[in-house]
Amino acid sequence: MELLRVAVFLGLCLGACCCQAVVLSDSAGLGRGFDGIGGLSGGGATSRLLVNYAEPYRSQILDFLFKPNFGASLHILKVEIGGDAQTTDGTEPSHMHYENDENYFRGYEWWLMREAKKRNPNITLIGLPWAFPGWVGHGKSWPYDFPDITAAYVVKWILGAKQYHDLDIHYVGIWNERNFDSKYIKVLRNALDKVGLTGVGIIAADGDWSIADSLNADPHLSECVEVVGAHYPGTTTVKEALQTQKKLWSSEDYSSVNDEVGGGCWARILNQNYVNGFMTATISWNLVSSYYEDLPFGRDGLMTAEEPWSGHYEVAPPIWITAHTTQFTQPGWSYLQTVGHLAQGGTYVALTDRRGSLTVVIETMTHDHSVCIRPPLPPFNVTSQNATFQLKGSFASIKELQVWRSQFNFKTKKPSFFQKLTSLTLVDGSFTLSVAEDEVYTLTTVTSGQKGSYPGSPPSARFPKQYKDNFDVRNPPFSEAPNFADQTGVFEYYLNLTDPGAHSFTLRQVLTERPITWAADADQTISVIGDHQWQNVTVSCDVFMESVKTGGVFIAARVDKGGQCVRSAQGVFFWVFADGTYKVTNDLADLVEDQTGAMASYCWFSSSCPQLDRLSWQTDSLGPGRTAGTP
């Protein structure tokens, strides 16, 4: 019935000037080229739990993200070039832990890019470092002192993507949200060109717009950079960036909880990044919330998939808001020059493939229902209105438009996302649309749109109360064990050939040198697993300390922080050292000792007793926390 009501209203308004008409025309030329909408996996470890989902749920999640004409149908996938360091919600392993070490199967970003390309062969792939292995800086926490080494490290990642995974990387960045170095950018461009990667564009500098001044002042630097990328620009750019005549991207944006307000944030910025700032691509941090929710920025993805043990996932509002643009446009389309703000608030954009297709996206998100996590949103007003559009130029002959609508319905709390309405018949190229507050419309000549669906995912469940892993996997599909989320250091499957017995298959912490960090990594290596709400916990594990004099291990529970805040975490920490001593503290800094002692009856590791013994620890009736430590 509602579809009929809308169709009738639209018909009654045809040909009648309900308000001043907005002209959509290509007669005076077109605007900037459209580069796409994307998601970011990394920065860091934001897709960590996704790989552990069983089929068919893992493929279903990937379909909602990447499959054309199904869900978000993303045009762009941006991934972290792992650097062995904490980069928000965890560490991602490097392809080169050390200078003479190369492994292009570590981590899960290779797999994710392959899966994305499998669904959309034309997807744009981007790599960006957040951190670097320590050897790149030769002992200094700075990647620019030896630009040739850093450039070679990044180029090898791009070459490895092609050689081992048949992945063509289209763009590469400099150093996420950190200072850029003009010399390094030039060295990187030269290194790419020398090995035939002339088609790989450089995005700079994945922070603010300040690199624009350097680009305008240095023609050589300008030649090296293809895209000026800014993070969380608040839908605005600066004149210096426009003067570069480069592509302008919001190369990281959104970063908001994926509820209805988060969906409203995403709807507003997808339109207004171009209307206000001429940005032709917008990339969401993050792609999918697939990390323990109690880590920083929980549920800040386009959808949520944080329970591989249950198979449960949630297709959140941002997925369908994305579809309003991505299912009816493609990179290579162009914006019309006729884009802008509606009279009573809200915005519209129009895009064309230059071959007669037209897509118009309208959003009327109100202030309080479209606030993003950053930056602060200045006040503005939006009210219900009738918006009349007049098609001219090559679009004047269009007779019919497909109509898709999302209504947030904050008052009734009964949202309706990405619903196909009755098609709209135009009279003399004109139509009028009645738009209420907090709505998104797509009107398009493209007929292939679809709201994909699968049977509901399994019910949500907490992490299993009883869990064990002996790491006995002969050919592991990934380098990391399921459900372990590294926070500092890198833990990998390791075949211990020196022990043919029960400890042949192990999980080993492989770093011995502090990386060039992005966040405040802890001094200790840490991996987390389990449920943050656990209260009474018994943990048992076998440990082997390879460093006789300085080795140690801890297990912790009731830990109050993780991710980029892990260094200041407090909880209950049980430490055991290679010399047989132990202690219990309430933080990682060893500021407060509750108990110390010796464990002479245990032979943890020494030159005379190279064996593993069982470490068992139990806590009762303490505050909530998370199990963590060095397995």
Image: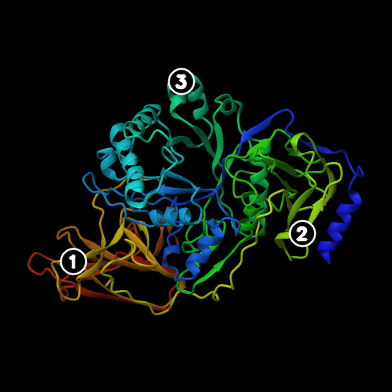
Q: Which amino acid, mark 2?
A: Leu
Is the Cβ of the residue at disc 1 closer than 8 Å to that at disc 2? Answer: no
- Res. 54 visible in picture: yes
Binning the other alpha carbons within 10 Å of mark 1 as few (below 14), some (14 to 19) or many (20 upward) gives some
Could you say where residue 315 lies in the image, as x and y percent from the top left?
59, 64
Q: Which amino acid, mark 3?
A: Asp
Q: Secondary structure at mark 1?
A: loop
**Residue that mark 2 sits on:** 421
**Residue placed most toward the observer, 24 or 577:** 24
Task: First in sequence, mark 1 or 2: give its number.
Answer: 2
**Residue placed most toward the observer, 208 or 448:** 448
Is the Cβ of the residue at disc 3 closer than 8 Å to that at disc 1? Answer: no
Mark 2 vs mark 3: in front: 2
**Residue that mark 1 sits on:** 496
Note whether 46 is above or below 194 in the view shown.
below
**Residue that mark 3 sits on:** 218
374 on left or right of 578? right
Could you say where residue 182 lies in the image, as x and y percent from the top left?
40, 27
Could you say where residue 514 lies in the image, as x and y percent from the top left?
28, 48
529 on left or right of 380? left
Quote the CA–CA distance across marks 1 and 2.
61 Å
Is the Cβ of the residue at disc 2 closer than 8 Å to that at disc 3? Answer: no
User: Quick one: quadrant of the C terminus?
Assistant: bottom left
